[in-house]
Image (cartoon, rainbow, N blue to C red):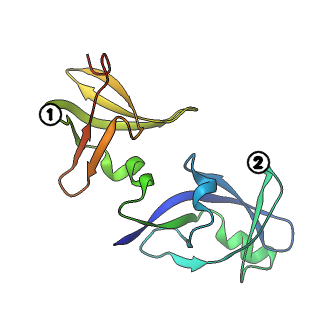
Amino acid sequence: MKTKLFPIAKITRASGLNGEVGVRPLIRQFDDYVEKPLFIGFDENLARDVKLEKVTGVNKRRRFLFQGYKTRDAAESMIGQLLFASISDKDPINMISSDLIGATVITDNGVPVGELVDMMSLPANDVYVISRDKKEILIPVVPEIIREVDFRMGIVTITPMDGLID
């Protein structure tokens, strides 16, 4: 199974003198992925692996310490870089990949729905914004509706509930 890097957070600030940094999560599922193998870099092609040593604080005030980054200068050198998680092709996080923008959305019966033009992260779940006949349709990104995502073909297959796309 092929693995790839998915951006989960951006390093925003140095905290204290011991190399700790603050991060801004880029996805709602950040806590689920921070325990996976992590990489840091400005781009996924230039990312290098890092090991999370310690997390302190709570909620938005958490601070992360990575092995090998023990000084304030080391922490400041990470500001602006992205934190990537290593994921597989079958990982559910792929359903909110920016690579899907422009994909064709069809029903499981093969009926075209429209083009995926944007994604939103709402409190309950993520949502696809589909452009159809100069209107926008919002489709929740949940397994009951999103049946298949084919990156190679650029097709998202859904099983719409009554009234979802009408």
Corner quadrant of residue 130: top left
Tell me the crowding category of disc 2: few under 14, some 14 to 19, or many 20 or more residues within 10 angstroms, Cα based. Answer: few
Looking at the rendered image, the disc whose residue lies closer to the viewer, 2 or 1, is 1
Asked if residue 99 is positioned above or below residue 40 in the image, the reply reads above
Percent of width and height locating residue 95: 38, 48
**Closer to the camera in the image, 135 or 151:** 151
The amino acid type of the residue labelled 2 equals Asn
Which secondary structure lies at badge 1?
A: loop
Q: Earlier in the sequence, mark 2 or mark 1?
A: 2
**Residue lying furthest front:** 144
Percent of width and height locating residue 28: 57, 45
Please report the residue visible at 45 percent of the width from the left and 69 percent of the height from the top. 44
Please report the residue visible at 76 percent of the width from the left and 48 percent of the height from the top. 59
**Residue lying furthest right:** 17
Asked if residue 91 is positioned above or below residue 121 in the image, the reply reads below
Tell me the crowding category of disc 1: few under 14, some 14 to 19, or many 20 or more residues within 10 angstroms, Cα based. Answer: few
Disc marking residue 39: none
How far separated are the C-alphas under marks 2 and 1? 43 Å
Left or right, 29 with respect to 52, comes to left
Percent of width and height locating residue 47: 50, 75
Image quarter in which the C terminus is found: top left
The residue labelled by disc 2 is 59
The amino acid type of the residue labelled 1 equals Asn
**Closer to the camera in the image, 22 or 105:** 105
Disc marking residue 109: 1
Question: How many marks overall?
Answer: 2
Which secondary structure lies at badge 2?
A: helix
Percent of width and height locating residue 152: 21, 58
